[in-house]
Image: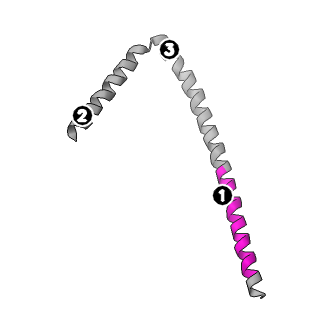
Amino acid sequence: MVQVETMAQFGVIFLLFALGLEFSMAKLRVVPAIAIVGGLLQIFLFMCLCGIIASVRLIIVKMIRFSVDFWAVTEEHR
């Protein structure tokens, strides 16, 4: 088990080294602008998604509560 983990770690190290050889300084200078815009966009989209999910969940909970309350009221009147 330890041998597999060690080999996997070496594989990751070599992969990162190979990726590092592919980048030039000109490409790396562009990264901060792209990272800032991409990061802000990702945060904004995730916030929107969480808001939509929370709204849908709230609507479903209200529907269930209404159904249970309605069922309880109709059972009392029988």
| Segment colored magenta | 53-73
Q: Residues within 10 Å of mark 2 (few under 14, many from 20)?
A: few
Tell me the kind of residue under disc 2. Thr
Pick the quarter of the image with the C terminus. Answer: bottom right
Q: Position of residue 28 (x, y in %)?
A: 48, 17
Element under disc 2: helix
Q: Which residue is mark 3?
A: 27
Asked if the residue at tag 2 contacts the one at tag 1, i.e. Cβ–Cβ closer than 8 Å, the answer is no
Pick the quarter of the image with the N terminus. Answer: top left
Q: Which residue is mark 1?
A: 57
Checking the image for residue 5, the label placed there is: none
Checking the image for residue 6, the label placed there is: 2
Q: Nearer the viewer, residue 75 or 13?
A: 75
Work out whether mark 1 precedes mark 3 in sequence or the reverse, and give the earlier one.
3
Is 31 magenta? The answer is no
How far apart, in angstroms, are the residues tagged by discs 1 and 2? 45 Å
Residue positioned 49% across, 11% down in the render: 26
